[in-house]
């Protein structure tokens, strides 16, 4: 009886809150059936990335080139990481979701983004020993109060059951914001910005790691993080982002 009464009270409480604060679409603020969701119109505007894909960069192919196929871009400039995957193409709507999470405290966006990331990166996450979010420098973390990549990593860890290890990677020096920087400047900006703490190097050695970030643009940040993990002995490093910029030299965020 006590349990039934508690469930009834909880249900009434949720109904009352829905009357006071009806759930709204994270992107356009239209009414939706449940919290932390997109409306049908915004959902259909997302450009989901589906196979066939370049196995290294995760960018879509126009036609199936066979399992493990590599794009011309990956052959010309091989990435430091093993595989990268993204849930959606970076465009106006995915930018809006990323900015809602990153700059406007819309933490509910992380649940939607993480579910899509977990689906897109299922193979990477299933093969990983740990999920590692891209860290913020301590002063930026203090100013923003949260790390959006950490929120995504925790949600993906909850969905997949994989360990989330933010302590395996730290940002050891401040860097400029990558938004608006050209590819070469991005590389210089984050060079040697990350490190695996000495006390944790034995834990990283021989492990398979998935790096989590909100968007993969030129890959400069992911490259710097991958190098730090490789130097600590990581056996495999994959990258999972919410959005991929398909033409990074022509679009900056």
Image (cartoon, rainbow, N blue to C red):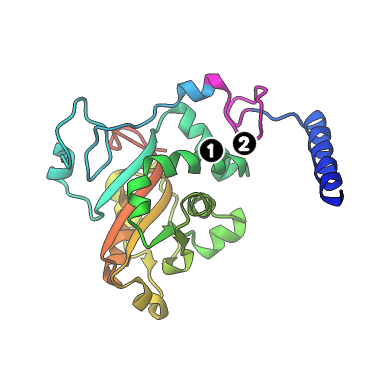
Q: Is residue 90 above or below residue 144?
A: above
Count neighbours of disc 2 (C-alpha within 10 A) and say few if under 14, some if 14 to 19, many if 20 or more. Answer: some
- Position of 205 compared to 147: left or right? left
Q: Quadrant of residue 223?
A: bottom left
Q: Which residue is mark 1?
A: 112
Magenta region, residue range: 25-41
Work out which residue is located at the far top of the displayed protein and give it.
Answer: 41
Q: Which mark is residue 224?
A: none
Q: Residue at x 23, y 55 (%)?
A: 80
Measured as percent of width and height from the top left, residue 42 is found at 53, 23
Indicate the secondary structure of the residue bearing disc 2. loop
Q: Quadrant of residue 60?
A: top left
Q: CA distance from mark 1 to mark 2?
A: 7 Å
Q: Residue 41, how many percent across, how many down?
A: 53, 19
Q: Any magenta on residue 166?
A: no
Q: Are marks 1 and 2 in contact (CB under 8 Å)?
A: yes
The residue where tag 2 is placed is 36
Q: Main secondary structure of the magenta part?
A: loop
Which residue is located at x 22 percent, y 43 percent?
A: 55
Q: Earlier in the sequence, mark 1 or mark 2?
A: 2
Q: Does residue 122 appear in the picture of this structure? A: yes
Residue 61 in picture, x, y percent from top left? 22, 30
């Amino acid at each position: 009886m006590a349990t039934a009464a508690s469930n009834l009270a909880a249900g009434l409480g949720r109904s009352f809150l829905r009357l006071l604060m009806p759930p709204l679409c994270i992107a356009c603020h239209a009414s939706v059936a449940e919290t932390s969701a997109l409306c049908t119109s915004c959902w259909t505007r997302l450009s989901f990335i589906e196979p066939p894909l370049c196995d290294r960069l995760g960018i879509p192919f126009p036609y199936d080139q066979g399992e493990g196929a590599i794009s011309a871009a990956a052959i010309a400039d091989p990435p430091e990481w093993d595989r990268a995957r993204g849930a959606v193409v970076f465009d106006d709507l995915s930018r809006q979701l990323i900015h809602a999470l990153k700059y406007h405290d819309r933490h509910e966006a992380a649940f939607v983004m993480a579910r899509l990331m977990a689906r897109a990166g299922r193979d990477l996450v299933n093969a990983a020993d740990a999920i590692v979010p891209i860290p913020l420098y301590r002063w930026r973390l203090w100013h923003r109060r949260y790390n959006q990549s950490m929120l995504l990593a925790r949600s993906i860890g909850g969905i997949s059951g994989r360990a989330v290890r933010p302590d395996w990677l730290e940002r050891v020096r401040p860097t400029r914001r990558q938004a608006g920087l050209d590819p070469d400047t991005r590389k210089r900006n984050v060079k040697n910005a990350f490190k695996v703490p000495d006390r944790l190097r034995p834990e990283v050695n021989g492990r398979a790691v998935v790096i989590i970030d909100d968007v993969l643009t030129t890959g400069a940040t992911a490259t710097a993080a991958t190098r730090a993990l490789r130097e600590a002995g990581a056996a495999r490093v994959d990258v999972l982002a919410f959005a991929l910029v398909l033409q990074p030299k022509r679009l900056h965020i």
